[in-house]
Image: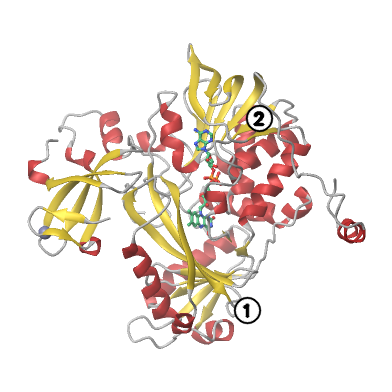
Amino acid sequence: MRYSGARVILEGLRGQRGWRPAWREPAPKSDYDIVIIGGGGHGLSTAYYLAREHGAKSVAVLERGWLGSGNIGRNTTIVRANYYLPGNSEFYSHSLKMWEGLERELNYNVMHSQRGLINLFHSDGQRDAFARRGNAMANQGDDAILLDRDGVRKHLPYLDFDNPRFPVYGGLLHPRGGTARHDAVAWGYARAADRRGVDLIQNCEVTGIDVQNGRVTGLQTTRGSIRAKKVGIVVAGRSSQVAAMAGLRLPIESHVLQAFVTEGLKPVINHVVSFGMGHFYISQSDKGGLVFGGDIDFYPSYAQRGNLPMAEHVMEAAMTLMPVIGQARVLRSWGGIMDMTPDGSPIIDKTGIDGLYIDCGWNYGGFKAVPASGFAFAHLIAQDRPHRIAERFRLDRFTTGRGLMDEEGTGAQHNLH
Amino acid sequence: MRLTCPHCGERDLREFAARGSAVVLSRPSAGASAEEWADYLHIRDNPAGEARDLFYHTPCGLWIEVTRSTITHAVIAARPVREAKP
Ligand SMILES: Cc1cc2nc3c(=O)[nH]c(=O)nc-3n(C[C@H](O)[C@H](O)[C@H](O)COP(=O)(O)OP(=O)(O)OC[C@H]3O[C@@H](n4cnc5c(N)ncnc54)[C@H](O)[C@@H]3O)c2cc1C
Ligand SMILES: [Zn+2]
């Protein structure tokens, strides 16, 4: 069923009786050409582009919980292309362009809202760094505008511009940056993949990867064994465990990242805003909740919940930057398991086992990557060679030392990102 | 999560800085191969379960090795790094 304005009106007149489930619930077959492990954003988009771009006919996605139960439904929904380093820059630029056509492509309202993103700076040194980043963005063909203090004031009058320790010097505006509805991205890709014949299999945990003579042959799952010619691992925070089923060890640590949302309020924050002097960024959802977060808790964790010190830090930073937020009440907080790499950049590569591929290491920034990651990973799986937008996301860069992409400049080492 | 410093007792988590996996205590010897160094620096078991991590207790300056569950955040043991076997 195609979704459209006319359909909404028609169903309204008919008492909403014509809607059908957005995807089938097939039982797993015993055999597929390609199996994707993980029904998050990246797994679903990979399956979609395998069918759409490469004509793959026999594809399944295996998800141990329900579709969208992982980070794809837990993130703070920011979509941007303001990366600096070659490798990241062209990839995220490509991803943002894909976002801009996504709703038409999927026939699904993902509520992509290019409301503008402003990264604030609070010193001369930070201004120089953001000017340089803005130039890199412009060189990549994306948009960046350096705002001075008055320029920021026009957009964000509610900030405390004269905080004695962290006065606002200005900000880098990325007009095409913004947000999207995270669940809708998972659902939109799921529905579109299903319509192209992909089997989406929920409540199906992969418990073993069968490898014979250096080649993957199939999987063991809680819903039986499944033979497969090719397998893609896309399980975010669980990457180390699933890769270990094939005897692989990864350059990954799993960490918890927290997020917070307030009660619904009338529109007050119209952009995505990030503080340059503490870990805090914020946007307002279409439901009215202020959605905000900060940094990871910095100790490895699979708990999907964090501890209070980071919550306190985030609230303090929020109050420093925009004291007005003190009037809002926090409704909920939660955490997701982040697949952190030493250099903070992702991996889309072969594994050394024939037919086994991996897409992981998205750190805290993989939501915006969902379209391009699926697109590039599908290309790698189907063609057995990397797509040019993702060819620097190599697994072996941590062994050879060549091509590390330390976007934050903190050092390519665990525990620093 | 509450951590116990062997010097100071159970203290607020805010007093501790997380300093990464305790595998960094097993530094390769001077003649180690590039692979061994890459493994030491970057590759991790990343266990879902019992893990050993380093924390630094800022007020007293002690480095401690904490054994804890990465699933429940339960702390199982804590000792000064100098007593931890590499
Ligand atoms: C609080 C928070 C805020 C964030 N904010 C942003 C942001 O603003 N912008 C941004 O770009 N990114 C953000 N991110 C990061 C982003 O959400 C992730 O990088 C991205 O969602 C990870 O890819 P995914 O969607 O495929 O992961 P997931 O949705 O986690 O998918 C992985 C799936 O694999 C499944 N799985 C695991 N093991 C198995 C198994 N053995 N068998 C079968 N299935 C298995 C899991 O159940 C899960 O559904 C944020 C993350 C968090 C937690
Ligand atoms: Zn102490």
Q: Secondary structure at mark 2?
A: strand
- In the image, ligand 2 is in what quadrant? bottom left
- The residue depicted at 25 percent of the width and 54 percent of the height is B18
Where residue A215 appears, as percent x and y from the top left, is: 52, 16
Position of residue A226 in the picture relative to residue A239 (left or right) = right
Which tag, 1 or 2, sits closer to the chain's start? Answer: 2
**On screen, residue A49 above or below B13:** above
In percent of width and height, residue A352 lies at 47, 23
Q: Amino acid at mark 2?
A: Ala
- Viewed as shown, does residue A287 lie left or right of A107? left
Q: Are marks 1 and 2 on the same chain?
A: yes
The outermost residue toward the top is A213
Seen at 67% across and 65% down, the residue is A113
Mark 1 and mark 2 in contact? Answer it, CB < 8 Å. no
Q: Is residue A273 above or below residue A360?
A: below
Residue nearest the viewer, comparing A36 with A351: A36
From the Cβ of disc 2, is ligand 1 less than 8 Å away? no
Residue A99 spot, x, y in % from top left: 68, 55
Give the distance between the C-alpha atoms of the residues marked 1 and 2, in whole angstroms: 41 Å
In front here: A229 or A411?
Answer: A229
Disc number placed over residue A267 in the picture, else none: 1
Picture disc at residue A60 = 2
Front position in the image: A235 or A348: A235
Residue A335: where, in percent of width, then height?
44, 55
Density class for disc 1 (Cα within 10 Å; few <14, some 14-19, many ≥20) is few
Which chain is mark 2 on?
A
